[in-house]
Amino acid sequence: KKKKLGQRLTEVEEKALRAQLKPHFVIDAISSIQSFLGKNPAMAESYLSKFSHFTQEVLVNSEKKKIPFADELSMLEKYIDLHILRLKQPLEYKFVIDQQIDPESTMVPPAILQPLIENAINHNFMVKDGKGWIAIHCLQEGNFLKFTIEDSCGGSPVSIEVQSSDVYDRKIFGIQLVRERLDLWSVGKGSQGYLELVPKTDGMCVFLGIPL
C-alpha cells in the first residue's frame, strides 16, 4: 500500500506542475504527505486525495475566465487544508457567506483569493509559534461582492528564513497579480474592483471588492 501511495504521489506532483502551481507549494505539500506515508498511511491517503482533487480543479479552472463562486470556495478550502498540514501550530479558518449570495450562479475570477491567503500563511503563521485563525467574510452590496479577509496569529517569531527576499518578492508579485486581474475583470462592468490591505498588530485585514 505504501508503494502504491508513493506512485500516486508522483502522479499528482506531475499534474500539479502541469497546472502551473508554484513549485514551493507543490514541494512543501508533497514533502508533508511523504512524511505521513510510514507513520500514518490513512492520513497520507486522505491528504493525497485532497491534493489530487485540488490540482485537478486548478488545472481545469486555469483555462476559464470565470468560475462559480462555489468552485472558488472549494479550491480555497483544499488549499488552506494543505498548508495546515505543514504548519507546526494550530490554524483555524472559517467562511462566512451572505445568505443572499448564490455560490453556484455567482461568477468570480478563478483563484482570485488564493494569493491573499498565501500571504497570510507565509507572513504570519509561518513565522510565529502561536495559535492562529483566518476568517473570510463575503457579502453582496449592489453589484459588488465585498470580501473581508482577516488573519490573526499570536506567539513569538520563530524563524527569519521565510522572510527572505524570495518570499517578499512572491508577496509583492501575488498582490500585484490580484490588482491586475481586478483591473481586467472590471472592464465593461461599470465599477472598478478594489484591494486594500490594512496591517494589524497580530496580522492583516484585507478588503477586496469584485464587481459583478
Image (tube, grey):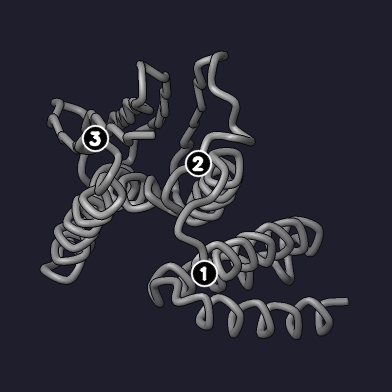
* Label 1 SS: loop
**Front position in the image: 94 or 88:** 94
Residue 127 visible in this rendered orientation of the protein: no
Is residue 78 visible from the viewing direction of this image? yes
Image spot of residue 100 (x, y percent)? 54, 14
Could you tell whether 33 is left or right of 101 in the image? right
* Kind of residue at disc 3: Gly
The residue at the point 41 percent across, 26 percent down is 135
Which residue was labeled with disc 2?
107
Helix, strand or loop at label 3? It is: loop
Q: Viewed as shown, does residue 43 lie left or right of 130?
A: right
Quadrant in which the C terminus appears: top left
Mark drawn on residue 141 = none
- Is 22 left, or right, of 106 in this rendering? left
First of labels 3, 2 by sequence position: 2
Q: Nearer the viewer, mark 1 or mark 3?
A: 3
> Disc 1 marks which residue?
63
Q: Amino acid under label 1?
A: Glu
Picture quarter with the N terminus = bottom right
Would you place residue 28 above or below residue 146 in this image?
Answer: below
Q: Which of 55 and 66 is in front in this view?
A: 66
Query: Helix, strand, or loop for circle 2?
Result: strand
Q: Label 2 vs label 1: CA separation?
A: 15 Å
Q: Which of 15 and 13 is in front in this view?
A: 15
Question: Quick one: label 1, few (<14), some, or many (20+) residues within 10 Å?
Answer: few
Local packing at callout 3 (Cα closer than 10 Å; few below 14, some 14-19, many 20+) is: few
Residue flagged by tag 2: what amino acid is it?
Met
Residue occupied by mark 3: 190
Measure the C-alpha gap from mark 1 to mark 3: 25 Å
Dots 2, 1 in contact, CB < 8 A: no
Percent position (x, y) of residue 140? 41, 19
